[in-house]
Amino acid sequence: MYWRLSLQKEKKSAECGSVKSAYWSEILARILLFGLRTSTSHGTLTKRARRLEKASAAMDNTWMLLVCFVVLVSCCSCADDERAIKLKPVTAALHTQWAQTPLIMEAAEFFYDENPGMFWSFVDRLRDVIGTKSRTWTEKEQHDVAISIGLQLLSPVKQNFLTFAMALRYYSPRIEMYRQILLSEVSTPKGCKDVLVDFGGGLVSCGVKEFADTLQTFDASKTSDRKNPKVISVDHQYPGSSSSATTVMVYGNLLSPVFYQVHELIMSENTDFRFVFRHHLDAISSSHYSKVRIPGYGVELAIKSTEYKAQDDRKIKEGKAGDQAKPEEEAVDDELDTDIEGFDFGKLKSRFPQKKDQLEQMKSFFLQSTGTELQQLKAWQFQDLSLQAAERALKVAALHTGSATDALRTVRDISQNFPSQAPTLLRIPVQELVKAEIERNREYFAHYHNLEHGSAALFINGIQYDTDLLDTFALFDKLREENRLMESLHSFGIRGSDLSAVLELDLRPTESAKYGVDIRHPAVVWINDLEKDKRYADWPSSPRELIRQSFPPTLLKPIRRNFYNLILVVNPANVSDSRDILKLTESFYVHRLPIRMGVIFVTNSDAKIDGTTDASVAIYNSFKHITEQKNGATALSFLTDLYTKAVKDGQVVADEVVKYFKQKYPQENPDAIFGPDSVYNSGRNDGRQFIEKLNIGEPPLVLLNGVQLDKSKLTADEFENEVLQNLVGVYSVLQRDVMSGQLTDHSNVIEYLMAKPHIVPRLNSLILDPPEFRFLEFGGKSLDPEKYTFSYFEALKAEDRTATMVATSFYLVKHEEEEAHPVTMWVVADAETPAGRELMYNMVKHSKTSKNVRVAFIFNPSETESIEKGMQLTKAIQVALETQSMSLARNFITKLLKEENVAEIATGTKIWEDFEVNGMDMKAFTSGLKELSSDFLKIHGLFAREELNLSPGENVLIANGYIVGPVKSDFGMDDIALLEKYIESYGATKLSNELHRLNIFRTADQLSDAVMMTSTLLSGLGSQEEAKKRTKVQYSEMAHSVINIEQRDTDSPSFDITFIVDPVSREAQKIIPVLMVLHEALNCRVRVFFNCKDKLSEMPLKSFYRMVLEAKLTFTENGSIAPNYALARFPALPQTALLTMNLQAPDNWLTEATSAVYDLDNIRLTELVDGWGIHGGFELVNLLLEGSAKDAATDQPPRGTQFVLGTRNQPEYMDTIVMANLGYFQLKANPGAWILKLREGRSHEIYSIASAEGAEKEGSDEEQQRVVIGSFNTKMMKIYVKKRPGMEREDVLSEKKDAVESEAGIFNSISSYWSKDEHKSASASDDVINIFSLASGHLYERFLRIMMLSVVKNTKTPVKFWLLRNYLSPQFKEIIPYMAEHYGFEYELVEYKWPRWLNQQSEKQRIIWGYKILFLDVLFPLSVKKIIFVDADQIVRTDLKELRDFDLEGAPYGYTPFCESRQDMDGFRFWKNGYWASHLGNRKYHISALYVVDLARFRKIAAGDRLRAQYQGLSQDPNSLSNLDQDLPNNMIYQVPIKSLPQEWLWCETWCDEASKAKAKTIDLCNNPLTKEPKLASAMRIVPEWNTYDQEIKRLIDEFYAVRQLTGENAGEPVLREAVPEDTFGGNDADNEIPVHSTGHTHEHGDEL
């Protein structure tokens, strides 16, 4: 660690001796450096210091620390009595909106997610701990009990996950979800604590006695109106509980002895009920006094520009600052003691309590000596800062064994405090060895991982994670899933470095591995042939043209080879499906694209009809005839013209086809072509045979080189793009093939393409795209051979049963030799049925031809009662496997499975000996058959029923754990071959080869077992996540430039984490602290490679940052969670710098400040009245429910459609509007069970919900979906809607001609992201003036209030303000209701979370600009037809009704052009030159301070979607959209027209001359780039009435606080409300209010607008 000692500032008393304190400071610092295993440049030391350093090198580190401490403290103690300067820290914390949830319940949910059975094991052990006497359990006690039970039930690695889950408070939302379900769905009797049992139909019981009585008398069959309580996916069904249709819901408190009495009663009763458990929280008194503080987010303090002063000049009153709620000061001070320049002052104070004052002085000295004020660096000094930061960290790592963790901490401290740390790096020389190694590694990163200098990449076990979108809760899920795989591999003997090698294998198939079919079929009618047609004769024919560079570059190079073969499979009579894709295919031909095109017609297969009676046959016959007589292109042209001219009402009939054919070809004989004796009738069924044999589905279909394109993209809008995208993939593969020499000039291209491994004889959706991917779970422990009986097997857990089946399986293979088989197939079938025998027979035949497959049988008897005496064929097969060699058994079984032999055995015509194979030991077979126990059949049957969920007699195949089926009788040899190829494509062979190379297993069978049990898990088969792709991190070397931290436990599986990063980047700020926590919490090996960016020209980081994340919970002496838990701490900030606080939470969190005294948008610590500092208390207000919606028929977004989210008691709690962009929507929610449905009105009239992924149906109502939210993670939905009959031509955004929206419709919306607390009923009257505005920071909120007052004073029509909630301070939200009531206006607080798919902005000011323009179509309800945006710093001088009624002449919005009358500002009019001058032409550049939007027109032309699409493209360039809110609409002026408003609508002094001011209808306080005058000063000078308004508002605010103080409303105790509105669950407000401890208050702000 390095320190820059500010010796000139140091002031020590002369009483300390004759030695200068500066000299002593330098010497003592050197001793400290050695004691802390740190170093510095020898060139900067004095000779005397160097001699001391050399002598001290031989000292023991502990002794040096003691000497250092005593001397330095003595020096400090002899200083004068001047107190150490106390720096003002900044801290922040985030709480949930809901009350505390018990840790023991959170832990219980962890066990449930591990295994539902483990949950009940946890409950049983917890019962013994709780005992029979009720008492209060502290949080520490609950935590310790959970950990102690975890020691009994969990592996060491999973114990770590349990501790980490509780530190994350991961399961708190799920516990809150149960609380909300109870409140919303059950009528709870007053005083019902600990246990509540819901029998449904309103019948509930409380306590043991009442429950026992109800249980004895309850008869569900006699209660006609009874409805079962709704069961959700995370509910806990009692073990052994019946699958009865009668559900009984038990709500219980796991910390109450009363619950366990009810629990034991349930377990002992033999009732025909389905008992389900949920948590009951009301008995936990501690839950009512505090909210849950949570980690998992970042806090940034960004340095603000001071070019324009944007601070409020009103100071906090003396009394108010002291009222700021903050954490206990001593607790915060303790937190600030940790990690100050490498010293843990908290530990030093605990060891030396008598030196506490001197240690405070010492801490203050170090904080100030490091430079707490920002220093301006020269441009040349930036160049090597990244390398110098890496060098400092690496020096720490090199000093002493085991100090790599300190090096990582150094990187964290540098990146998170970079503005202050940068000057300390300047004197650090970078070693050439380090620099050279970093350079070589950078070349590797660029080549193998496509990383530019300065870019970051995070790999965990070879899986790459997006560093920009890293969410700690989502990461926890992924690590936990990965750990299950690691522990499985570890249990199979794959450990240590071998485990790392296996986890780095990329087993996912390549993109070209999409399966295709052979297109060489007579059903294809080819339109053209590039290799034979004369029109392509001038093209080159060599495949090498694919890799030859061309100018201009082109994808589809004109080459006379059939590289791209496009086949359309259509029913020609289905015009709507066929017309567009045929027309577009014709355009491909006309424009000479190098694509070979063909058509397959699927016609009516009825032999009785012909071309005169059926349109599909008529079109097929005419097409074939024209192709033979002319060519395919002429036939295609005939067909597309036919669709244009002969189709009526979307239908085509045979008569019209024949009639049109006669017009085109009058010389032909129609009867010979269309009649019953037509020569073309013989081939018309080829198309039907093609799709049935290949099993590719029903038309329309499109195949490219045999691979099927996305059927949903076969529309006029998307077909062309879908074809081109797939051509890109084929093109890249062909290029590789040419470069590798596989594709040459002599190759037959079609033969070559059809010989590709992904071309198969037949497709099968049951294998490739099942409704649900199902897998066996391996990893248990098998039965001992001597215990292989049904009674022992029945008692096993699921994974142990599977392990036993693995251990007792007998395999059929191609060769007897000892070799591994990467694919293991289990055939689960009933050999006593024809279907079962056919499947087994086909599988045995396949084992004879494939060297990669081994086959075993599991028998699933249809009739269990015949097991003892019957099923002789099944038993004979089993005995043959047990007593004969593999090849003899295979041949014998092959004979037994033939149907003719089965018939002869059944009739007694032949016996077993008649099928004897040469060399077979019949004596052993006969003996074995007599001695065989039927237990094996019972075991197989039980496994099939309970572990595979099969009915008796059902057949499935299991390939490497992947369960396929149930399969039908048409599952043949081609399907088996496809299944083998499918499993191999997911890396089974690659994994087998790697395990063979590692030489882990002694036998081939063991290796085959390992591949069977792990390949599908490792490859991510069935997963849609690209993150499953594994990559081996490639680097040059790691001798000098890498931080390497080994795992703590070498005997357990460990995560291999590799982070490539620039140490002075935003990724370092965010990810390094996460890695430190992961290393502490879990068993991880961490490697950090530096990808430094050299030759920097500016400060790479302009903010301070803290990642709030904890490895474990800490507690106070009284057992509560420590106050320093999950606290962001900034102990040593620049005191004079201007900073703004940003909370960087996961994308699905909506957060806001609970309250704030100081303006956190403009933090200058020297200006604080309170000497303590600032604490920010934030609240997680909502969890976002996101999704996409599409029309099931068109696969297009149902633009403008509204969805509603609510509960049973409050059906319309939140609503939203669907965007055209991706069909995206978002809804604010919180933990609970919600009901999602279409909004009453146009949305519900036109659409119904067809399906909803991520939801459960709500009862029998098809149009209501139940959405369960019980996690901090993102909840994503995919909804398909369908139009109701008769509504096919209707559009949600089109008004009904004869009626307006119904009263129950859009207008009465509860929210649409509007405040549920301050909402006023919106008026439907057109006379209401709707005004939209936003502000951030106290100054702009002051401007906003004045703007609102100026509007109200000058507008006679009723006014409603729509204010963006995201950045408003708590004070503003507190005062606005009072102001609205006083002046008689309405208001709504609207809110929208920036969508994750839309390119994010990092600066708060630019985010606020984005909100002004990007979400206008979804921020407001459809009932708002027009809205006016008015900037906060504007003064209105006229009635805005005039602007509302202004004729926009069809434009969606109207803006005022920039003034051009003030001539001295011409040099600043950027729109007069360059891009803007050429882009705008004669049009004006418009200012965004005031504009009016016709929202109906805006939505109708999809203006919002167009603006977002353009923004998405332009914002990729950081230099574009400098003024986002203005540049974007002006850039889109030709696509989204702007109506120019008269100039008098907006006047600002910067751009307009004084003469025009008199006519101004609004005055805007534009920044002046020439004078840079502060806003407040310009407001008071320019606008005479501004001061009057300002004083009036000030009096109103003072009155508000005086009234509140007088009435006692501000009691200092905030009220914790439930996560949904009070009236949701009935009852009065008091019943739903929970007092909580006062917490610190801050708020979010934006930069100056």
Image (cartoon, helix red, strand yellow):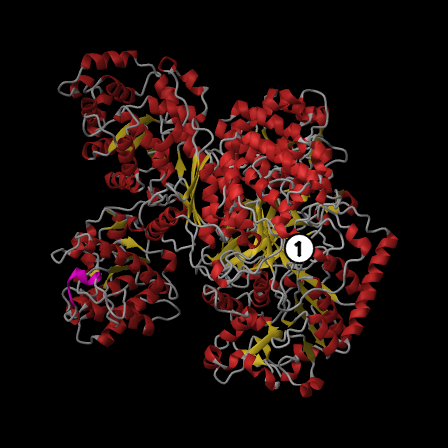
The local secondary structure at tag 1 comes to loop
The image shows residue 589, relative to residue 1174, as above or below, that is: below
**Residue 587 or 491: which is nearer the viewer?**
491
Using the image, determine if residue 1258 lies above or below residue 273.
below
Which residue is at a point 73% across and 34% down the rendered structure image?
A: 285
Q: Viewed as shown, does residue 557 lie left or right of 1022?
A: left
Residue 177: percent from left, percent from top: 62, 41
Q: Is residue 7 above or below residue 250?
A: below
Amino acid at dot 1 = Gln
Residue annotated with mark 1:
1135
The answer to whether residue 1389 is visible is yes
**In this image, 388 relative to 228: left or right?**
left
The residue at the far front in this view is: 18
Residue sitting farthest toward the bottom = 1555
| Start-end of magenta stretch | 540-547
Residues 210 and 1408: in front is 1408
In the rendered image, residue 743 lying in the magenta stretch gets the answer no
Q: For residue 544: magenta?
A: yes
**Camera-side residue: 1385 or 425?**
425
